[in-house]
Amino acid sequence: MIMNGKINETGDFGKGSSFSVHFKKVDVGAIAEEEPYSEERIDVNSIRFDEATVLIVDDIETNRKLIIEYLEPYVSIC
């Protein structure tokens, strides 16, 4: 895999599958801190992610549309 990771799949025929993607040494987010970290005071609006491409896969079109609509306010969808 290009990013030195791996993809695992488990599932049962006719019931569906579950996929997990694991990347080694890939920074995915950061908290812009102005004050020392406090577990009680995490401002979710301060979390920033680098631009990335996300593949949304589901055999049910309604589920794909729901995920896209949920993510739309946070990203630009091509």
Image (cartoon, rainbow, N blue to C red):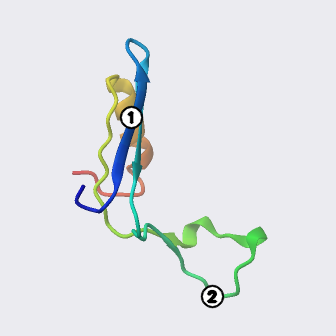
Helix, strand or loop at label 1? It is strand
Corner quadrant of residue 65:
top left
- Residue 22 on image: x %, y %: 41, 53
- Which residue is labeled 2 in the image? 34
- Rendered view: 71 above or below 31: above
State the residue in front, 72 or 42: 42
Compared with 25, 4 (above or below) is: above
Residue 9 image label? 1
Tell me how far mark 1 sits from mark 2, CA to CA.
Answer: 40 Å
Q: Is residue 50 above or below residue 73?
A: below
Amino acid beneath label 2 = Glu
Name the residue: 32% across, 25% down. 61
Residue located 35% across and 22% down the image = 60
Name the N-terminal-most of marks 1 and 2: 1
Pick whichever, 55 or 62, lies toward us: 55
Question: Which label was assigned to residue 67?
Answer: none
Mark 2 falls on what kind of element?
Answer: loop
The one of 67 and 11 positioned closer to us in this rendering: 11
